[in-house]
Amino acid sequence: MVLTREQAAGKVMVALDYADAASAQRLLEELQGIPCYMKVGMQLFYAAGPAFVELLKSKGYKVFLDVKMHDIPNTVKGGSNSVTKLGVDMFNVHAAGGAAMMEAALEGVDAALSAGQSKPTVIAVTQLTSTSQATLNDEIGIAGTVEEAVIRYARLAKGAGLDGVVASPMEVGSIKAACGAEFQTVTPGIRPAGAALNDQSRIMTPGEALRQGTDYMVIGRPITAAANPREALENILKELV
Ligand code: C5P
């Protein structure tokens, strides 16, 4: 797959895992002009709120709001409605909430769309990558392997009408085989060769993840904790074009 630099940037989701807006804004200044996707997770969203998403949108960024909704269908419908009005390009819910909850998320989106607004991509969290085999079987009480659970959740999300799932880059092939090539995969656990692993264990380089067919790769600390974040991102983009 040959990507242009702009296409490569559009596939990289920078995880803005910061405690406050000022810290995240400093990174935005460093990365100015590179059209990557920005991922806002719970930490930043709970601290800086909708205003920070609005700031990103005003700067022209695509925004993935990674808030992993998981509640009764009516509440998730309301949450989806609010984040669609906020103008995010992607958000996620937990597949473990079940089909009715995921369908309610899509209803919330449809009810919120304004004229001409494109629909946000709605994806599901399958099994958190922090879940070990023992946690799945002995604590949560789900039998079978983690991979089987991931595929079952992915099929459930696809059946409910969602656009894709968050997954390990190792699972992209089996998810695409089960749910079709168009079913999108968003993969964290990406580490450029030589980068610190931090707490990620099953990792791939950006180039490897691209060859697996991932649609978007979430990359946090290899960029945000780098001595020169712009150079770190540029090096990642060079690996993808
Ligand atoms: O810094 P790092 O590249 O490890 O950041 C990965 C990002 O992806 C973090 O924001 C983390 O919350 C998120 N994520 C993950 N594993 C998942 C789901 C989300 O690492 N299964």
Image (cartoon, rainbow, N blue to C red):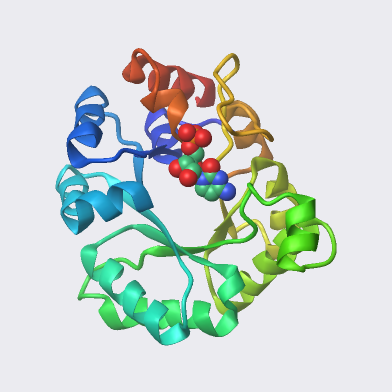
Q: Is residue 2 left or right of residue 150?
A: left
Q: Count the marks: how many?
A: 0
Q: Where residue 45 sits: x, y (%)?
A: 29, 53
**Please, which residue is most extreme toward the right here?**
144
Pick the residue in front: 160 or 83: 83
Q: Where residue 196 sits: x, y (%)?
A: 55, 20
Asked if one can make out residue 7 in the rendered structure from this viewpoint, the answer is yes
Which quadrant of the structure image shows residue 210?
Answer: top right
Q: Where residue 137 sits: x, y (%)?
A: 80, 61
Q: Is residue 1 above or below residue 38?
A: above
Pick the residue in front: 81 or 213: 81
Q: Is residue 196 left or right of residue 137?
A: left
- At horizontal 26% and vertical 44% (from top left) the residue drawn is 61
**Please, which residue is most extreme toward the front here?**
139
Pick the residue in front: 74 or 87: 74
Q: Is residue 158 left or right of residue 10?
A: right
Pick the residue in front: 56 or 202: 202
Asked if one can make out residue 178 in the rendered structure from this viewpoint, the answer is no
- At horizontal 76% and vertical 68% (from top left) the residue drawn is 141
Q: Where residue 4 sits: x, y (%)?
A: 43, 30
Q: Quadrant of the N terminus?
A: top right
Q: Is residue 149 above or below residue 77?
A: above
Q: Is residue 110 above or below residue 138?
A: below
- At horizontal 44% and vertical 28% (from top left) the residue drawn is 221
